[in-house]
Image (spheres, rainbow, N blue to C red):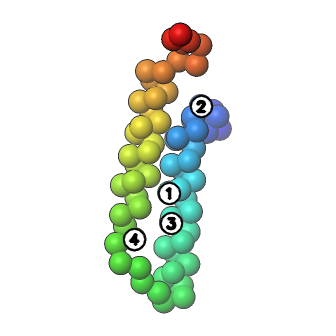
């Protein structure tokens, strides 16, 4: 549970994106539909998660650069 609480906005968005993409792919297979290049959403979500990790590591919320 601590892992989930430590995620920032980008990481949470990526995790939800992966979960909903898996669900959508499962539903598409149940109704026997095929979407070309559906797999391409997963690298996108991984990129968003990595971006969120970089933001979390290097951007501090208390840093005010004025």
The answer to which of marks 1 and 2 sits earlier in the sequence is: 2
Q: Is residue 15 above or below residue 53?
A: below
Circles 4 and 2: CB atoms closer than 8 Å: no
- Residue at the outermost bottom position: 32
Q: Which mark is residue 48?
A: none
Please state the horizontal and vertical placement of residue 6, each as a whole percent of the image.
59, 31
Q: Quadrant where the N terminus lies?
A: top right
Circle 4 Cα neighbour tier, 10 Å, few/some/many (<14 / 14–19 / ≥20): few
Q: CA distance from mark 4 to mark 2?
A: 29 Å
* Residue that carries the numbered disc 4 in the rendered image: 38
Q: Nearer the viewer, mark 4 or mark 3?
A: 4
Circles 4 and 3: CB atoms closer than 8 Å: no
Q: CA distance from mark 1 to mark 2?
A: 18 Å
Circles 1 and 3: CB atoms closer than 8 Å: yes
Q: Identify which residue, 31 or 10, lies in the foreground.
A: 10
The answer to which of marks 4 and 1 sits earlier in the sequence is: 1
Q: Which mark is residue 6?
A: 2
Helix, strand or loop for disc 1: helix
Q: Which mark is residue 18?
A: 1
- Residue at the outermost front position: 66
Q: Is residue 26 above or below residue 3?
A: below
Q: Which mark is residue 22?
A: 3
Please state the horizontal and vertical placement of residue 50, each as a whole percent of the image.
40, 39
The residue under the point 45% across, 43% down is: 49
């Amino acid at each position: 549970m601590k892992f989930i609480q430590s995620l920032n906005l980008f990481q949470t968005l990526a995790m939800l994106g992966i979960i909903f993409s898996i669900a959508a792919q499962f539903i598409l297979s149940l109704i026997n539909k095929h979407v070309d290049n559906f797999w391409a959403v997963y690298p996108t979500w991984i990129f968003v998660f990595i971006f969120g990790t970089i933001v979390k590591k290097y951007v501090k919320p208390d840093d005010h650069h004025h």
